Amino acid sequence: MSLAATRVRYVLKRLIQSIPVVIAILVINFFLLHMAEGDAADVLAGEAGSATPEYMEQLREKFGLDKPLPVQLAVYLKNVLSFDLGYSFRHGMPVIDLVMDRFVPTLLLMVSTIVIAVGLGIILGLIAASGLNTWRDNLISVFALITYATPLFWIGLMMIVMFSLKLGWFPTSGMENVAAFYEGWDRVKDIAHHLVMPTVTLSLFYLALYTRLMRASMLEQAGMDYVITARAKGLTERRIVFVHILRNALLPVVTMAGVQVGALIGGSVIVESVFAWPGLGMLAYEALFARDLNLLLGIFLLCALLVVAINLVVDVIYSFLDPRIEVG
Protein backbone atom coordinates (compact mmCIF):
# COMPACT_ATOMS: atom_id res chain seq x y z
CA MET A 1 0.00 0.00 0.00
CA SER A 2 1.35 3.44 -0.97
CA LEU A 3 2.12 6.12 1.62
CA ALA A 4 -0.70 8.36 0.33
CA ALA A 5 -3.24 5.54 0.59
CA THR A 6 -2.02 4.75 4.10
CA ARG A 7 -2.51 8.36 5.18
CA VAL A 8 -6.02 8.47 3.69
CA ARG A 9 -6.88 5.26 5.52
CA TYR A 10 -5.48 6.74 8.74
CA VAL A 11 -7.58 9.91 8.36
CA LEU A 12 -10.76 7.90 7.79
CA LYS A 13 -9.94 5.71 10.80
CA ARG A 14 -9.44 8.77 13.01
CA LEU A 15 -12.68 10.34 11.76
CA ILE A 16 -14.62 7.21 12.73
CA GLN A 17 -12.92 7.17 16.15
CA SER A 18 -13.87 10.82 16.71
CA ILE A 19 -17.63 10.15 16.38
CA PRO A 20 -18.10 8.75 19.93
CA VAL A 21 -15.89 11.56 21.26
CA VAL A 22 -18.14 14.23 19.72
CA ILE A 23 -21.27 12.44 20.99
CA ALA A 24 -19.80 12.26 24.50
CA ILE A 25 -19.02 15.99 24.37
CA LEU A 26 -22.59 16.70 23.28
CA VAL A 27 -24.06 14.66 26.14
CA ILE A 28 -21.77 16.20 28.77
CA ASN A 29 -22.45 19.74 27.57
CA PHE A 30 -26.19 19.05 27.48
CA PHE A 31 -26.33 17.95 31.12
CA LEU A 32 -23.92 20.64 32.34
CA LEU A 33 -26.00 23.42 30.78
CA HIS A 34 -29.25 22.00 32.15
CA MET A 35 -27.75 21.71 35.65
CA ALA A 36 -27.55 25.52 35.85
CA GLU A 37 -30.52 27.33 37.35
CA GLY A 38 -33.00 29.04 35.03
CA ASP A 39 -33.98 28.43 31.42
CA ALA A 40 -35.30 30.28 28.38
CA ALA A 41 -38.77 30.50 29.93
CA ASP A 42 -37.38 32.39 32.95
CA VAL A 43 -35.60 34.90 30.71
CA LEU A 44 -38.59 35.52 28.44
CA ALA A 45 -41.01 35.77 31.37
CA GLY A 46 -38.74 38.28 33.06
CA GLU A 47 -38.53 40.41 29.92
CA ALA A 48 -42.29 40.27 29.41
CA GLY A 49 -42.93 41.24 33.02
CA SER A 50 -45.28 38.31 33.39
CA ALA A 51 -44.26 35.26 35.38
CA THR A 52 -47.59 33.57 36.12
CA PRO A 53 -47.45 29.77 36.42
CA GLU A 54 -49.71 29.39 33.38
CA TYR A 55 -47.48 31.61 31.19
CA MET A 56 -44.32 29.82 32.35
CA GLU A 57 -45.89 26.45 31.61
CA GLN A 58 -46.83 27.58 28.09
CA LEU A 59 -43.28 28.74 27.40
CA ARG A 60 -41.71 25.52 28.65
CA GLU A 61 -44.14 23.47 26.59
CA LYS A 62 -43.35 25.58 23.52
CA PHE A 63 -39.59 25.00 23.84
CA GLY A 64 -39.91 21.36 24.94
CA LEU A 65 -38.56 22.13 28.41
CA ASP A 66 -41.46 20.38 30.16
CA LYS A 67 -40.18 16.91 29.19
CA PRO A 68 -37.73 14.87 31.32
CA LEU A 69 -34.04 15.50 30.62
CA PRO A 70 -33.37 12.06 29.05
CA VAL A 71 -36.24 12.65 26.62
CA GLN A 72 -34.94 16.13 25.78
CA LEU A 73 -31.47 14.66 25.19
CA ALA A 74 -32.80 11.92 22.92
CA VAL A 75 -34.77 14.45 20.87
CA TYR A 76 -31.73 16.74 20.61
CA LEU A 77 -29.37 13.93 19.48
CA LYS A 78 -31.91 12.79 16.91
CA ASN A 79 -32.17 16.32 15.55
CA VAL A 80 -28.37 16.72 15.43
CA LEU A 81 -28.08 13.56 13.32
CA SER A 82 -30.40 15.22 10.80
CA PHE A 83 -28.31 18.45 10.96
CA ASP A 84 -31.02 20.27 12.90
CA LEU A 85 -29.46 22.17 15.81
CA GLY A 86 -32.72 23.68 16.94
CA TYR A 87 -34.05 27.23 17.06
CA SER A 88 -32.62 30.28 18.83
CA PHE A 89 -35.43 32.06 20.66
CA ARG A 90 -33.19 35.08 21.29
CA HIS A 91 -32.27 35.71 17.65
CA GLY A 92 -35.41 34.26 16.09
CA MET A 93 -33.63 32.04 13.56
CA PRO A 94 -32.29 28.46 13.20
CA VAL A 95 -29.15 27.82 15.24
CA ILE A 96 -27.22 26.30 12.34
CA ASP A 97 -27.71 29.44 10.21
CA LEU A 98 -26.71 31.72 13.06
CA VAL A 99 -23.65 29.68 14.04
CA MET A 100 -22.35 29.33 10.49
CA ASP A 101 -22.83 33.06 9.92
CA ARG A 102 -20.69 33.86 12.98
CA PHE A 103 -18.21 31.04 12.33
CA VAL A 104 -16.59 32.81 9.37
CA PRO A 105 -15.40 35.86 11.39
CA THR A 106 -14.10 33.61 14.18
CA LEU A 107 -12.31 31.33 11.70
CA LEU A 108 -10.76 34.40 10.07
CA LEU A 109 -9.53 35.66 13.44
CA MET A 110 -8.25 32.23 14.53
CA VAL A 111 -6.39 31.44 11.30
CA SER A 112 -4.68 34.83 11.17
CA THR A 113 -3.76 34.52 14.86
CA ILE A 114 -2.31 31.01 14.47
CA VAL A 115 -0.32 31.99 11.37
CA ILE A 116 1.22 35.04 13.07
CA ALA A 117 1.74 33.48 16.51
CA VAL A 118 3.20 30.16 15.31
CA GLY A 119 5.16 31.60 12.37
CA LEU A 120 6.69 34.51 14.25
CA GLY A 121 7.11 32.40 17.40
CA ILE A 122 9.21 29.85 15.48
CA ILE A 123 11.39 32.60 14.01
CA LEU A 124 11.92 34.41 17.33
CA GLY A 125 12.57 31.14 19.17
CA LEU A 126 15.13 30.16 16.54
CA ILE A 127 16.89 33.54 16.78
CA ALA A 128 16.93 33.39 20.59
CA ALA A 129 18.31 29.83 20.68
CA SER A 130 20.99 30.54 18.06
CA GLY A 131 22.27 33.48 20.14
CA LEU A 132 22.04 31.92 23.59
CA ASN A 133 22.72 34.41 26.43
CA THR A 134 23.36 37.25 23.97
CA TRP A 135 21.43 40.54 23.81
CA ARG A 136 19.13 39.00 21.19
CA ASP A 137 18.22 36.12 23.46
CA ASN A 138 17.67 38.42 26.46
CA LEU A 139 15.58 40.90 24.46
CA ILE A 140 13.33 38.20 22.99
CA SER A 141 12.95 36.48 26.37
CA VAL A 142 11.93 39.73 28.09
CA PHE A 143 9.48 40.52 25.27
CA ALA A 144 7.94 37.05 25.55
CA LEU A 145 7.64 37.35 29.33
CA ILE A 146 5.93 40.75 29.16
CA THR A 147 3.42 39.76 26.45
CA TYR A 148 2.65 36.46 28.22
CA ALA A 149 1.91 38.23 31.51
CA THR A 150 -0.14 41.12 30.10
CA PRO A 151 -3.97 40.63 30.06
CA LEU A 152 -5.54 40.48 26.61
CA PHE A 153 -8.26 43.02 27.39
CA TRP A 154 -5.66 45.60 28.53
CA ILE A 155 -3.62 45.15 25.34
CA GLY A 156 -6.79 45.54 23.26
CA LEU A 157 -7.90 48.69 25.08
CA MET A 158 -4.43 50.28 24.83
CA MET A 159 -4.29 49.51 21.11
CA ILE A 160 -7.67 51.18 20.62
CA VAL A 161 -6.51 54.27 22.53
CA MET A 162 -3.18 54.50 20.70
CA PHE A 163 -3.83 53.35 17.14
CA SER A 164 -7.51 54.25 16.77
CA LEU A 165 -8.29 57.28 18.92
CA LYS A 166 -4.90 59.05 18.86
CA LEU A 167 -3.28 58.04 15.57
CA GLY A 168 -6.44 57.11 13.65
CA TRP A 169 -4.71 54.28 11.81
CA PHE A 170 -7.31 51.57 12.46
CA PRO A 171 -11.06 51.43 13.21
CA THR A 172 -12.06 50.97 16.84
CA SER A 173 -14.49 48.08 16.38
CA GLY A 174 -16.50 45.90 14.03
CA MET A 175 -15.56 43.67 11.13
CA GLU A 176 -16.21 46.05 8.25
CA ASN A 177 -17.57 49.47 7.39
CA VAL A 178 -21.13 48.49 6.51
CA ALA A 179 -22.13 52.04 5.57
CA ALA A 180 -19.46 52.19 2.84
CA PHE A 181 -21.05 49.34 0.81
CA TYR A 182 -17.66 48.02 -0.34
CA GLU A 183 -17.56 45.17 -2.86
CA GLY A 184 -14.86 42.88 -4.24
CA TRP A 185 -11.27 43.68 -3.30
CA ASP A 186 -12.31 46.91 -1.61
CA ARG A 187 -14.37 44.89 0.88
CA VAL A 188 -11.50 42.42 1.39
CA LYS A 189 -9.12 45.29 2.20
CA ASP A 190 -11.68 46.85 4.55
CA ILE A 191 -12.12 43.57 6.48
CA ALA A 192 -8.33 43.11 6.62
CA HIS A 193 -8.01 46.66 7.96
CA HIS A 194 -10.51 45.88 10.75
CA LEU A 195 -8.81 42.53 11.43
CA VAL A 196 -5.35 43.92 12.25
CA MET A 197 -5.83 45.01 15.87
CA PRO A 198 -7.92 41.99 17.05
CA THR A 199 -5.38 39.64 15.47
CA VAL A 200 -2.35 41.39 16.98
CA THR A 201 -4.02 41.50 20.40
CA LEU A 202 -4.87 37.79 20.40
CA SER A 203 -1.53 36.82 18.81
CA LEU A 204 0.73 38.42 21.42
CA PHE A 205 -0.13 35.97 24.20
CA TYR A 206 0.31 32.88 22.00
CA LEU A 207 3.37 34.39 20.31
CA ALA A 208 5.09 34.47 23.70
CA LEU A 209 4.09 30.85 24.34
CA TYR A 210 5.43 29.53 21.02
CA THR A 211 8.60 31.65 21.24
CA ARG A 212 9.54 30.24 24.65
CA LEU A 213 8.60 26.70 23.59
CA MET A 214 10.59 26.92 20.34
CA ARG A 215 13.65 28.30 22.14
CA ALA A 216 13.57 25.49 24.73
CA SER A 217 13.00 22.85 22.05
CA MET A 218 15.90 24.13 19.91
CA LEU A 219 18.27 24.10 22.90
CA GLU A 220 17.16 20.58 23.85
CA GLN A 221 17.71 19.23 20.34
CA ALA A 222 21.08 20.99 20.02
CA GLY A 223 22.48 18.74 22.75
CA MET A 224 21.35 15.47 21.17
CA ASP A 225 23.79 12.81 19.93
CA TYR A 226 22.71 13.11 16.29
CA VAL A 227 23.80 16.78 16.30
CA ILE A 228 27.26 15.83 17.61
CA THR A 229 27.47 13.14 14.92
CA ALA A 230 26.46 15.64 12.22
CA ARG A 231 29.20 18.05 13.34
CA ALA A 232 31.74 15.19 13.38
CA LYS A 233 30.84 14.43 9.76
CA GLY A 234 31.73 18.00 8.84
CA LEU A 235 28.24 19.32 8.05
CA THR A 236 27.90 23.09 8.09
CA GLU A 237 26.23 24.69 11.10
CA ARG A 238 23.54 26.14 8.84
CA ARG A 239 22.63 22.69 7.50
CA ILE A 240 22.64 21.17 10.99
CA VAL A 241 20.29 23.83 12.32
CA PHE A 242 17.82 24.10 9.45
CA VAL A 243 17.77 20.50 8.20
CA HIS A 244 18.20 18.45 11.38
CA ILE A 245 17.58 20.46 14.57
CA LEU A 246 14.71 22.64 13.31
CA ARG A 247 12.67 19.73 11.99
CA ASN A 248 12.73 17.91 15.33
CA ALA A 249 12.28 21.11 17.36
CA LEU A 250 9.03 21.83 15.52
CA LEU A 251 7.29 18.73 16.94
CA PRO A 252 6.40 20.23 20.36
CA VAL A 253 5.32 23.49 18.69
CA VAL A 254 2.97 21.66 16.33
CA THR A 255 1.56 19.69 19.27
CA MET A 256 0.97 22.85 21.29
CA ALA A 257 -0.70 24.56 18.31
CA GLY A 258 -3.22 21.73 18.12
CA VAL A 259 -3.86 21.70 21.86
CA GLN A 260 -4.28 25.48 22.02
CA VAL A 261 -7.14 25.62 19.49
CA GLY A 262 -9.74 25.21 22.24
CA ALA A 263 -8.04 27.85 24.40
CA LEU A 264 -7.85 30.14 21.37
CA ILE A 265 -11.64 30.03 21.04
CA GLY A 266 -11.93 30.93 24.73
CA GLY A 267 -9.48 33.81 24.32
CA SER A 268 -11.42 35.11 21.35
CA VAL A 269 -14.38 35.84 23.67
CA ILE A 270 -12.37 38.62 25.34
CA VAL A 271 -10.95 40.00 22.10
CA GLU A 272 -14.29 39.88 20.30
CA SER A 273 -15.91 41.72 23.21
CA VAL A 274 -13.26 44.46 23.23
CA PHE A 275 -13.34 45.02 19.47
CA ALA A 276 -17.03 44.12 18.91
CA TRP A 277 -15.91 41.43 16.47
CA PRO A 278 -19.02 39.48 15.38
CA GLY A 279 -17.73 35.97 16.01
CA LEU A 280 -18.65 32.84 17.95
CA GLY A 281 -17.04 34.09 21.17
CA MET A 282 -19.29 37.13 21.34
CA LEU A 283 -22.28 35.01 20.33
CA ALA A 284 -21.59 32.46 23.10
CA TYR A 285 -21.27 35.28 25.63
CA GLU A 286 -24.68 36.65 24.62
CA ALA A 287 -26.29 33.19 24.52
CA LEU A 288 -25.03 32.37 28.01
CA PHE A 289 -26.73 35.36 29.63
CA ALA A 290 -29.89 34.81 27.57
CA ARG A 291 -30.00 31.12 28.60
CA ASP A 292 -30.27 30.23 24.91
CA LEU A 293 -29.29 26.58 25.41
CA ASN A 294 -29.84 25.47 21.81
CA LEU A 295 -27.48 28.17 20.60
CA LEU A 296 -24.86 27.34 23.23
CA LEU A 297 -25.00 23.64 22.36
CA GLY A 298 -24.64 24.48 18.67
CA ILE A 299 -21.56 26.61 19.37
CA PHE A 300 -20.01 23.91 21.57
CA LEU A 301 -20.67 21.29 18.88
CA LEU A 302 -18.96 23.37 16.21
CA CYS A 303 -16.00 24.06 18.52
CA ALA A 304 -15.68 20.34 19.30
CA LEU A 305 -15.68 19.46 15.59
CA LEU A 306 -13.07 22.16 14.96
CA VAL A 307 -10.77 20.86 17.72
CA VAL A 308 -11.10 17.27 16.46
CA ALA A 309 -10.31 18.38 12.89
CA ILE A 310 -7.28 20.44 13.97
CA ASN A 311 -5.86 17.59 16.03
CA LEU A 312 -6.28 15.27 13.05
CA VAL A 313 -4.34 17.74 10.89
CA VAL A 314 -1.64 17.92 13.58
CA ASP A 315 -1.27 14.12 13.57
CA VAL A 316 -0.83 14.11 9.79
CA ILE A 317 1.74 16.94 9.97
CA TYR A 318 3.58 14.91 12.60
CA SER A 319 4.03 12.05 10.14
CA PHE A 320 5.68 14.46 7.68
CA LEU A 321 8.00 16.03 10.26
CA ASP A 322 9.07 12.74 11.87
CA PRO A 323 9.28 9.70 9.53
CA ARG A 324 9.56 7.43 12.60
CA ILE A 325 5.90 8.07 13.35
CA GLU A 326 3.72 5.59 11.48
CA VAL A 327 0.18 6.24 10.32
CA GLY A 328 -2.25 3.53 9.52
Image (cartoon, helix red, strand yellow):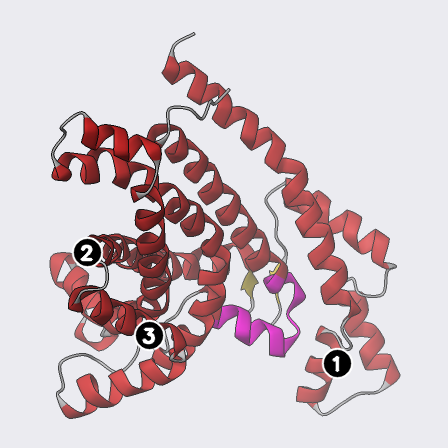
Figure check: 211 above or below 318: below
Occupied quadrant, residue 183:
bottom left
Q: Earlier in the sequence, mark 2 or mark 3?
A: 2
What is the tally of numbered marks visible in this picture?
Answer: 3
Q: Residues within 10 Å of mark 3 (few under 14, many from 20)?
A: some
Which residue is drawn at the image coordinates 22% and 29% (left, top)?
Answer: 230
- Tell me the distance, in whole angstroms, between the alpha carbons under discs 3 and 1: 42 Å
Q: Which residues are magenta?
A: 282-296
Label ID, residue 147: 3
Q: Position of residue 251 (x, y in %)?
A: 38, 41
The residue type indicated by label 2 comes to Ile
Asked if marks 3 and 1 touch (Cβ < 8 Å), the reply is no
| Horizontal side of residue 125 vs 7, given as left or right | left
Q: Nearer the viewer, residue 50 or 241?
A: 241
Q: Residues within 10 Å of mark 1 (few under 14, many from 20)?
A: some
The residue type indicated by label 1 comes to Asp
Nearest to viewer (mark 3 / mark 1):
3
Disc 2: which residue: 127
Residue with the most extreme top position:
1
| Horizontal side of residue 50 vs 52, given as left or right | left
Which residue is drawn at the image coordinates 71% and 74% (left, top)?
Answer: 40
- Tell me the distance, in whole angstroms, between the alpha carbons under discs 2 and 3: 18 Å
| Horizontal side of residue 99 vs 202, given as left or right | right
Disc 1: which residue: 42
